[in-house]
Amino acid sequence: TPEHIKPEWYFLAGYQFLKAAEIFEFLGRGAPKILGVIGQGIIIFLLIIFPFFDKHPERHPLRRPIATFIGILLTLSFIVMTIWGYYS
């Protein structure tokens, strides 16, 4: 695959996550790809199960600082990884 090919914008965060996993090259040749895919799978799994563990009856975001922080952190992470993937 040529290096200049990039995925559509909505896949850039995952693409950059896989490229960032290359720091694990010292674990073996295939380790970065495996860890990159497993890492993304863990993030998706946590997003799916989070509502089942967050049983707080209050729905207002300012009264749920942990859930609000996690939501903002994940959103900003996705945006940063997408921008990083676009410019890399």
Image (spheres, helix red, strand yellow):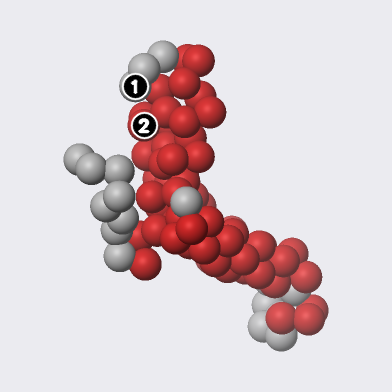
> Which amino acid, by three-letter code, is at mark 1?
Gly
Spot occupied by residue 24 in the image (x, y as percentages of width and height): 51, 24
Between the residue at mark 1 and the residue at mark 2, the CA separation in whole angstroms equals 6 Å
At x 67%, y 83%, the residue is 59
Label number found at residue 33: 2
Q: Residue at x 47, y 31 (%)?
A: 22
> How many residues crowd around disc 2 within 10 Å: few (fewer than 14), some, or many (20 or more)?
some
Q: Which image quadrant for residue 33? A: top left
Mark 1, residue position: 30
Can I make out residue 52 in this image?
A: no
As rendered, which of 5 and 13 lies closer to the eye? 5
Looking at the image, the residue that sits furthest to the bottom is 60
Q: Quadrant of residue 63?
A: bottom right
Residue in the image at 38% along x and 50% along y: 15
Q: Residue furthest left?
A: 1
Left or right: 33 as drawn, with respect to 51:
left
- Look at the numbered discs 1 and 2 and tell me whether their residues touch, using CB distance below 8 Å: yes
**Between 88 and 80, the one nearer to me in the picture:** 88
Q: Nearer the viewer, residue 84 or 71?
A: 84
User: Does residue 61 appear to the left or right of 24 in the view shown?
Assistant: right
Mark 1, Cα crowd under 10 Å, few <14 / some 14-19 / many 20+, is: few
Left or right relative to 48: residue 72: right
Residue 37, percent from left and from top: 37, 39
Q: Residue 19: give its label.
A: none
Secondary structure of the residue carrying numbered label 2:
helix
Q: Label 2 amino acid?
A: Lys
Q: Is residue 26 above or below residue 52?
A: above
Instruction: Tell me residue 49's x, y (percent).
Output: 49, 57
Q: Is residue 27 visible?
A: yes
Q: Residue 38: where, in percent of width, then height?
A: 40, 37
Q: Nearer the viewer, residue 83 or 54?
A: 83
